[in-house]
Image (tube, rainbow, N blue to C red):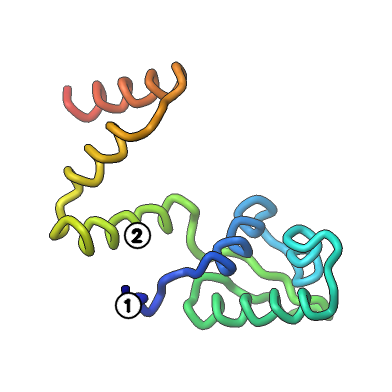
Amino acid sequence: MVRKPKDVTDAELAVMQVLWMRESATIREITDRIYPAGTASDYATVKKLLARLEEKTLVHRDASDTAHVFTATITQDDLITRRLRDVAEDFCDGSHTPLLMNLLKNTKYSTREREQLQNLFNELFK
C-alpha cells in the first residue's frame, strides 16, 4: 500500500502519543518516555522522528530556549478521523458503513462501551 504524504508511521505515532499525553515535551522527555533506558542512538531517532513530524506540520517546535519544546498541532481525534477516512477510501470506496459494521461486529465491548455506543446512536438518530 502506498503511503499518503502525511501518513504517520508507527514510530512517529509513538512520539505523537507522548505529546498528546504531556501536551508539550523536549526531545529528552520524549526519549525518556519511549526508551526508558535510552541511548544516544535513541535520542537521535526521536530527534529525526520529530523533524519528520515537523515537516508534515503535525508538530510545532518552540526554539526560544536551549532545549526545544515540541507540541502536537493535530489532536488525537483529528488524526483518528483522518486515518479512518483513509481506510474507508482505500478499502470501501469511501463508504464508512462497511468499516463501521466490521468494527461493531468484530469487537468485544464492555458494558460501559456498549452504553456509550447506544447513547451515541440515540443522539445521532433521534
Q: Mark 2 = which residue?
A: 82
Helix, strand or loop at disc 1? loop
Label 2 crowd (10 A; few <14 / some 14-19 / many >=20):
few
Left or right placement of residue 123 versus residue 62 in this view: left
Which of the marked residues, 1 or 2, is nearer the chain's N terminus?
A: 1
**Based on the displayed image, in which of its 4 quarters is residue 104 positioned?**
top left
**Based on the displayed image, in which of its 4 quarters is residue 107 positioned?**
top left
Spot occupied by residue 98 in the image (x, y as percentages of width and height): 18, 45
Residue in the image at 59% along x and 68% along y: 11
Foreground residue among 3 and 48: 3
Spot occupied by residue 70 in the image (x, y as percentages of width and height): 67, 69
Residue in the image at 21% along x and 61% along y: 89
Label 1 crowd (10 A; few <14 / some 14-19 / many >=20):
few
Residue in the image at 78% along x and 76% along y: 43
Mark 1 residue type: Val
Mark 2 residue type: Arg
Left or right placement of residue 63 versus residue 15 in this view: right
Q: Mark 1 = which residue?
A: 2
Spot occupied by residue 16 in the image (x, y as percentages of width and height): 58, 62
On-image quarter of the C terminus: top left
Spot occupied by residue 10 in the image (x, y as percentages of width and height): 53, 65
**Any mark on residue 29, and which?**
none
